[in-house]
Amino acid sequence: MGQGNTAHWSDIAAISAGSYHSVGLTRDGHVLAVGSNSAGQCNTTHWSDIIAVAAGYEHTVGLRRDGTVVATGANSSGQCNTADWRDIVAIAAGSLHTLGLRKDGTVVAVGSNSSDQCDCRSWQNITAIAAGGWHSVGLKSDGTVVDSCGDGVHREEVDNWKNVIAIAAGGKHTVALMADGTVAVAGQNNDGQCNVADWQLF
């Protein structure tokens, strides 16, 4: 699909990868995108003053310096309906949903809610967000993690985590970096994506 055709990119400050497209944020606030453009997910050349990017399955999201959010690509579930967002400090894109972290520590979400992935509007004191394929994760200021998904077992594991300093979400699993340099993981492990028990801080 051409998602690896980034050799000509330069002066890149941040990157994000969707299913079949790659996105790069330049230091001057513009956005480059290569790969499949089947739904318009690579139509970012007119964006400016962007400070963060996120790539979903077939959509791309950009956070502007003024706290507003732009989005392009597939919008079958409303995942690009971010035009009215304000005071956003971080963004994340899942398969069919998009998250925004407000500066007051609350979270906004649009898109598919088929697995409760958008049921995060009641979250408080959030400092970081991550969007998986069909779930959402939030890191709280006290080092605990909240998870929004239809998988109760997944949520129960995540609710027990403490002293977390960073989070990431894959298709159906969640990863957390602990303050002591260890890694915790919860969720589906059909391809060994949760086999992190021997990871350690070097």
Image (cartoon, rainbow, N blue to C red):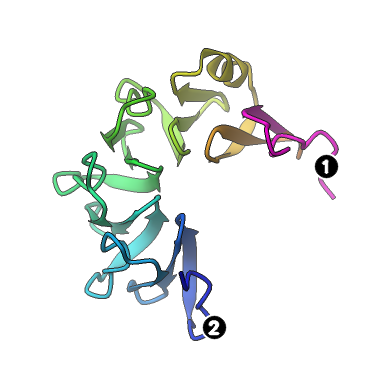
At a point 56% along the width and 24% down the height, the residue shown is: 144
Contact check, label 1 and label 2, Cβ < 8 Å: no
- What is the magenta range? 184-202
The residue lying toward the viewer, choosing from 80 and 130, is 80
Q: State the CA–CA distance, disc 1 to disc 2.
A: 32 Å
Q: Which mark is residue 158?
A: none
Q: Main secondary structure of the magenta part?
A: loop
Residue under numbered circle 1: 200
169 vs 88, nearest the viewer: 169
Q: In which image quadrant can residue 185 be found?
A: top right
Question: Dividing the picture into quarters, in which one does residue 95 lie?
Answer: top left
Q: Is residue 195 magenta?
A: yes
Q: Residue at x 71, y 34 (%)?
A: 194
Amino acid, disc 1? Gln
Q: Nearer the viewer, mark 1 or mark 2?
A: 2
Q: Position of residue 119 (x, y in %)?
A: 33, 23
Above or below 13: residue 60: above
Q: Which mark is residue 7?
A: 2
Amino acid type, residue under disc 2 in the picture: Ala
Image position, residue 50 (x, y; %): 31, 65
Could you tell me which residue is drawn at 50 percent across and 78 percent down? 5
